Amino acid sequence: METLHVDLGDRAYPIFIGSVLTNSELIKPYLTSNQICIVTNTVVAPLYLEAFCESLSDYSILKVILPDGESHKDLDTLNTIFDQLLAHHHNRKTTLIALGGGVTGDMTGFAAACYQRGVNFIQVPTTLLSQVDSSVGGKTGVNHKLGKNMIGAFYQPKCVLADTDVLKTLPQRELSAGIAEIIKYGLLGDAEFFEWLEEHVEKLLECDREALTYAIKRSCENKAQIVAQDEKESGVRAYLNLGHTFGHAIETAMGYGTWLHGEAVGAGMMMAVDLSARMGLIDESVVSRTKSLLERAKLPIQGPACMTNEQYIDLMSVDKKVLDGRLRLVLLKSLGEAFVTSDVDPKILAETLNATRSTD
């Protein structure tokens, strides 16, 4: 087992990586009472809920099983959690545990932030994407029909359990979606890690335990370091959104869940890298290397054929990084060095959107 720490002062917390799902001794120090509410979904529950509950059999457990998928990440589904907590008289000492992927984690965390103005919260991510990204850093929330993740809160968990064994049950699309976020860390701030990924991406697709453990740990180390510097995204944390402004526009336009989040981010990173090159910021070799790695990871490198430039601009204008009406994008100065800028020529942006649009 590997253990990392997110350094946030009195809100610091550990990330446990390895065969940890049913190791209750890791969780028990972070439970504040006998009350537990485990929130999961219809896909994860049949696989892991029973074993997870058995490891915590000394506690009074409420099980909330949500429908699966990004299309259900909304306020109506969120109310299901509140309804169950209130119906079963859960108090301020309860602990909400998210057992599932990024959607489950985001909604459970947001419910914990809101219920009785804030209760205990633990993340048990079961997808690669959630293990390397959404379970770490305290971003919680739900989608709105006009924009992704536009309603939420910063709310840190007490601990994170990232079990590598559960990844063997992931469909290939879900595994590739997680690898997109792993590639992101190499591009934005860790060129050495990017080179490692170029050598080992097939190992990740094969669910090689050693490769997965290393990639999860390295990704979490990168994210934890950034979050410790800038918890609420007033500065460098924005770098973690590389590819996301384009990607969120794709997810919103196509309907939540049509494209997996990591798939949209993969295409979005290709757009960001292409735009960086067209602006003369990076060498063409970075573009070709990024394209090759994304393709080997079985990720899209183009946006949907049906999306117009106007759609992209309209949806990107709702992005949380927009400031004083100006679109701000995360681009690259070099491989492993990101920055945020609002100084983008609309004509060059249009060239990138045209060049990275699928013709299928």
Image: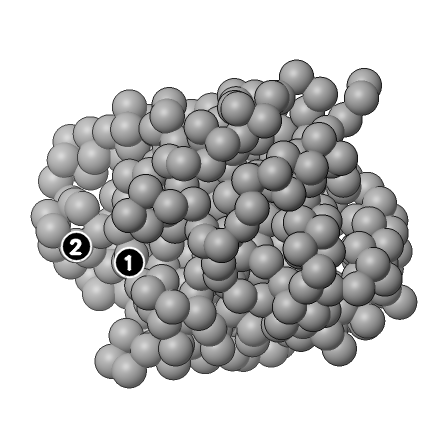
Q: Is residue 164 above or below residue 76?
A: below
Query: CB of mark 2 within 8 Å of CB of mark 1?
Result: yes
Task: Identify the residue shown where x is 76% and y is 68%.
Answer: 194
Residue type (three-letter) at the residue carrying disc 2: Gly
Q: In the rendered view, would you say 20 is above or below 140?
A: below
Using the image as rendered, state which of residue 144 and residue 58 is in the foreground: 144
| Quadrant (top left, top right, bottom left, bottom right) of the C terminus | top right
Q: Residue at x 24, y 59 (%)?
A: 120
Residue under the point 80% across and 55% down: 287
Nearer mark to the viewer, of 2 and 1? 1
Read off the residue under disc 2. 118
Give whichever of 57, 306 is nearer the camera.
306
State the residue in front, 238 or 355.
Answer: 355
Tag 1: residue type?
Answer: Tyr
* Residue 34: x %, y % from top left: 23, 58
User: In the image, is residue 15 above or below residue 68?
Assistant: below
Instruction: Looking at the picture, tell me which residue is in the foreground, 350 or 202.
Output: 350
Question: Quick check: 85 left or right of 259?
Answer: left
Circle count? 2
Quadrant assignment for the N terminus: bottom right
Cα gap from disc 2 to disc 1, whole angstroms = 9 Å
Question: Is disc 2 placed on a helix, strand or loop?
Answer: loop
Q: What colouring method underlies this structural image?
A: one colour
Q: Is residue 256 left or right of residue 77?
A: right
Mark closer to the chain start, 2 or 1:
2
Place of residue 209 in the rendered image (x, y in percent of width and height, measured from the top left) = 77, 64
Residue 125 visible? The answer is: no
Q: Which residue is mark 1?
A: 155
Secondary structure under the numbered disc 1 in the rendered image: loop
